[in-house]
Amino acid sequence: MHIPFLSFKEVNQKIKPQIIAAFENFFDEGWYVLGERLIKFEKDYAEFNHTSHCVGVSNGLDALHLALKVLSIGPGDEVIVPSNTFIATALAVSYVGATPVFVEPKKGTYNIDPNLLEASITSKTKAIMPVHLYGQACEMQEIMTIANKRNIWVVEDNAQAQGATYTGKLTGSFGTINGTSFYPGKNLGAFGDAGAITTNDAYLANKVKILRNYGSEKKYQNDEIGYNMRLDECQAAFLSIKLQYLHEWTTERQKIAGWYNLMLRDVGDLILPEVAVGATHVYHLYIIRTKRRDALQQYLREYNIGSLIHYPIPPHLQNAYVHLGHKLGSFPVAEEIANTCLSLPLWPGMSFAETEQVANVIKNYFHG
Ligand SMILES: *Cc1c(COP(=O)(O)O)cnc(C)c1O
């Protein structure tokens, strides 16, 4: 049985009639950018995320970039990001001319360690960007306390964790302004690129609206050097439809993760996902760790099972960031995670038989 890393088949089949109808409607109407579908999706997503505002933009990276920009973070400033994040978090910091300062995650949850934050805060630190990595909420209460005490912003990178909570509060609703991504593979994915910021601050939301549209509030009047970072009408229409199913799909992800947790317990040297007290996990990715990662991935490949590594090279070791002067060993926790992590197949609609097959092949690898 071939098991891909990710399949959209089940989800797409389910929503196909609604998507086709929405497309036809969009096509016939002939309004493609900044229209009523975007306004509706922004309202829908703000409601979902328990924030007063959502502003749709072109993708997750642009959302994070604009979030930092409207907080007036720029050259000479420092922004704290986790050392094991996807590169986009650090790129957003670089785009505004600030410097990403890496802080190590906890080895169990893979999320930024609040206990290490204070030591990394300097007089230049303007913001902390917690990343709810793999779908688990960061320890936000602890992070907010430190940020408030030190008078620095929090900008959540919620690209992987739509619907996750910490102490009952949704990720993407803690920070002053937050970014999320609707890249197709994310838990709420468009049929192409899309993203959004979420905030309770009307002024910041409006600033993002201006910047995403050439720095213009009034047509052909430009008050700022803005961008073209808009979210298309058809993607907005599709996202409003998919958002209706997000809770259901999250529950499915959690169910499949639960199967893996049971079936892979005490197998070889496997380390399974650990969820922090107070946090929920929406399993954007199901990560296992093992010293024999590369060989296990090869073995899975031989049995026609897809798997991926998120992420093989931490940001501080990327060529793009050599100028920061970090080296191998600078962030040992991030490096160890990069060398041992493996993401297993998981998507809403994945069957018990498929999950069991993946687990059995892994058991065979370790125990023969
Ligand atoms: C996907 C992702 C982004 C970027 O989103 P795009 O829509 O691909 O630009 C940023 N941060 C994290 C953690 C992501 O997973």
Image (cartoon, rainbow, N blue to C red):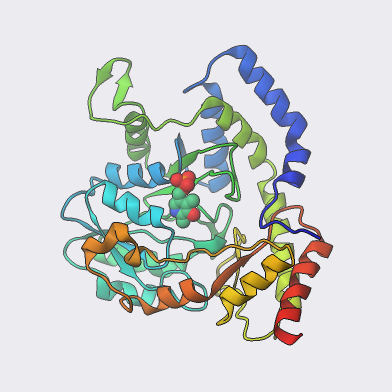
Q: Quadrant of residue 266?
A: bottom right
Vertical side of 368 occupied by 75: above or below = above
Tell which residue pokes out farthest to the right in this image.
353
Query: Which of the 4 image quadrants contains residue 134?
Result: bottom right
| Quadrant showing the C terminus | bottom right
336 sits left or right of 330 in the view = right
Residue 22 appears left or right of 99: right
The residue depicted at 50 percent of the width and 56 percent of the height is 171
In the displayed structure, 247 sits above or below 345; it is above
In the picture provided, is 60 more to the left or to the right than 221? right
- Residue 187 appears in the figure: yes
| Residue 18 screen position, x and y as percent | 73, 30
Q: Give how far across and how far down residue 10 sits, in percent.
A: 77, 46
Q: Residue at x 26, y 63 (%)?
A: 322
**Viewport quadrant of the N terminus:** bottom right
Q: How many marks?
A: 0
